[in-house]
């Protein structure tokens, strides 16, 4: 299970209506009592519209918090299974450690492990 909090966003790019977030280190747990591991992941969001002034250029660094707010029922989700794919409309809300908040509305989401990368027990810069 991937969680947004404490993930390190290495790159964020908005091309047309596709947002690509590349996580240099994202916390992943295989179960509620398992040890956390850190992995390089990528989140792709399609049908994106920027909903905040910060935008993609400001969306780099450590996340303080993040969540998906689903458009159909308003529920919030801070964790995602891995891999993950959804065609549900949502709002992606990211709050960075430096205080920047970025909001993106999206029509689809996909979370995947970056090829050739492995999980590690600890993440340090």
Image (cartoon, rainbow, N blue to C red):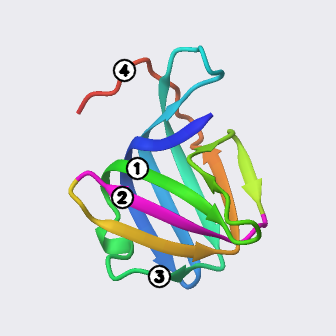
Specify which label sits upstream in the sequence, 1 or 3. 3
- Foreground: disc 2 or disc 4: 2
Residue 96 lies within the magenta run: yes
From the image, tell me which residue sits under label 4.
122
Task: Answer left or right for 82 relative to 33.
Answer: right
Under circle 2, the secondary element is: strand
Q: Residue at x 50, y 21 (%)?
A: 36
Which labelled disc corresponds to residue 65? 1
Few, some or many residues within 10 Å of mark 2 (<14, 14–19, 20+):
some
Specify which label sits upstream in the sequence, 4 or 3. 3
Task: Answer left or right for 20 relative to 7.
Answer: right
Q: Residue 100: x, y in percent?
A: 27, 65
Q: Main secondary structure of the magenta part?
A: strand
Specify which label sits upstream in the sequence, 2 or 4. 2
Few, some or many residues within 10 Å of mark 4 (<14, 14–19, 20+):
few
- Residue closest to the eye, 122 or 78: 78
Task: Answer left or right for 116 relative to 123.
Answer: right
C-alpha distance separating marks 2 and 4: 22 Å
Few, some or many residues within 10 Å of mark 1 (<14, 14–19, 20+):
some
Q: Residue 42: x, y in percent?
A: 55, 51
- Residue closest to the eye, 19 or 118: 19
C-alpha distance separating marks 2 and 3: 14 Å
From the image, tell me which residue sits under label 2.
95
Tag 2–tag 3 contact (CB < 8 Å): no
Specify which label sits upstream in the sequence, 2 or 3. 3
- Foreground: disc 4 or disc 3: 3
Tag 2–tag 1 contact (CB < 8 Å): yes
Under circle 4, the secondary element is: loop
C-alpha distance separating marks 1 and 3: 17 Å
Residue 75 lies within the magenta run: no
């Amino acid at each position: 299970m991937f969680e947004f909090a404490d993930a390190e966003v290495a790159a964020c790019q908005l091309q047309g209506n596709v947002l690509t977030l590349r996580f240099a280190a994202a916390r992943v747990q295989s179960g509620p009592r398992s040890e956390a591991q850190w992995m390089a992941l990528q989140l792709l969001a399609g049908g994106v519209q920027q909903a905040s002034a910060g935008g993609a250029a400001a969306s780099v660094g450590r996340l303080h918090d993040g969540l998906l707010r689903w458009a159909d029922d308003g529920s919030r989700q801070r964790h995602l299974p891995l891999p993950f794919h959804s065609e549900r409309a949502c709002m992606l809300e990211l709050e960075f450690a430096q205080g920047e908040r970025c909001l993106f509305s999206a029509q689809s989401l996909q979370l995947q492990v970056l090829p050739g990368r492995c999980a590690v027990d600890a993440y340090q810069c």
